Amino acid sequence: MVNKIGQMKIQQMAFMLIAITLFFVLVGLFVISIFFSGLKKEVAISQEKDALNLVSKIANSPEFSCGAAYGGQKVNCIDLDKIMGLIKNNETYGNFWKVKSLEIRKIYPVEEEIICNSQNYPECNYFKIYSKGGISEDQSSFATLCRKEFEINGIYNKCEIGKILIGS
Amino acid sequence: MKKIKNKAQSEMVGFALIIVVVSVILLIFLSISFKKSNDDITKSFEVDAFIQSSLSYTTDCAIQYTPNYYNIQRLILACNQNQPCIDGRQACEVLNESLHGIIESSWKIGENEPTKGYYLNITVEGQELIGFQEGNITRINKGSSQILDGGIDVIFVAYN
């Protein structure tokens, strides 16, 4: 009789141990999944930040930036008139930014894709500044594309929305 | 014998109680964490850059004379003061049209697109001026908020 009670007690304890172990394993898995989901988010944010840093570095360099020519200092503002100068001299500037490709696309207003050259500018929307072995779009960011527009009554600043695409 | 049986029963009840209590705590914790992730907006540098570019966009609404074309930031204030463009259209009409166009071409939404939906809200001194939302609102989002001169507050969230 005592033997049976002892066996039952051992069985009970075994079940209890299994249940507790299972419970802690589940809780552990849950905590780990939460921890890693946060980590993934952090990595995505960090990658986005790195991409934007590179894009900002290029967009805000003197060769690209609007400076104070379009009413105050603007961040990520690209002077399209300067870009046309760069396209003309892309062999000289080719390796200056240590990237594989450098492009700018107007995204609004939406128009049919026309590659810009000195003949069709500003009636175009795709600026291929530099490309070394194919086109890649590893990193991109929104940018303001500004130029001086002429009208019968005078000159004004016209800014559109575009994306700067960098292949690194 | 009866005493031993009773003791085992009470132990089982205790064990069951512990499991129920822990399960309830776990459920509460789960529901709180999911609710929190639903409401949270992940700060995005891409959206930040998008808002900045959008605010600088030159619209085709000239106020008082040409070529005094207003950009989105100035047009928000003009819309708030119900100013008309020189061609007879209302500043708010042009603002609404331009913002829809900018967002639609910058954040293409759809089942096979990375962006499933978006939400824009512009307030001036706490009063909502423009607010719209398209597509589906999901748990994964990226957004940004910018406070500008004249009490303008722009919030844009893209849902992935």
Image: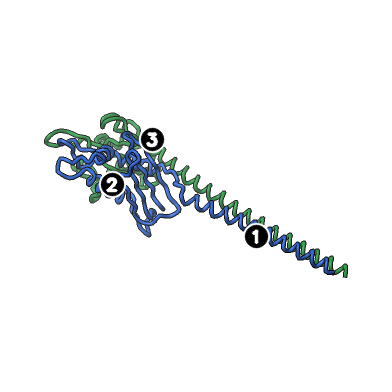
Chain colours: A green, B blue
Residue matched to label 1: B20
Q: Chain of mark 2?
A: B
The total of numbered circles placed on residues is 3
Position in image of residue A156 (x %, y %): 19, 34
- Report if the CB atoms under discs 2 and 3 are less than 8 Å apart: no
Q: Chain of mark 1?
A: B
Which numbered mark, 3 or 1, is in the foreground of this view? Answer: 1
Q: Chain of mark 3?
A: A
User: Dot 1, how many residues are within 10 Å of its Cα: few (below 14), some (14-19), or many (20+)?
Assistant: few
Q: Give how far apart the Cα atoms at labels 1 and 2 are.
A: 53 Å
Position in image of residue B69 (x %, y %): 20, 38
Dot 2 falls on a residue whose secondary structure is: helix
* Front in this rendered view, residue B27 or A104: B27
Dot 3 falls on a residue whose secondary structure is: helix
Instruction: Give the label on residue A57, or none.
Output: 3
* Front in this rendered view, residue A35 or A148: A35
Q: Give how far apart the Cα atoms at labels 2 and 3 are.
A: 27 Å
Q: In the rendered view of the protein, which quadrant contains the N terminus of chain A? A: bottom right
Residue type (three-letter) at the residue carrying disc 1: Val
- Report if the CB atoms under discs 1 and 2 are less than 8 Å apart: no
Residue type (three-letter) at the residue carrying disc 2: Leu
Residue matched to label 2: B99
Callouts 3 and 1 on one subunit: no
User: Dot 3, how many residues are within 10 Å of its Cα: few (below 14), some (14-19), or many (20+)?
Assistant: some
Position in image of residue A6 (x %, y %): 84, 65
Q: Give how far apart the Cα atoms at labels 3 and 1 are.
A: 57 Å
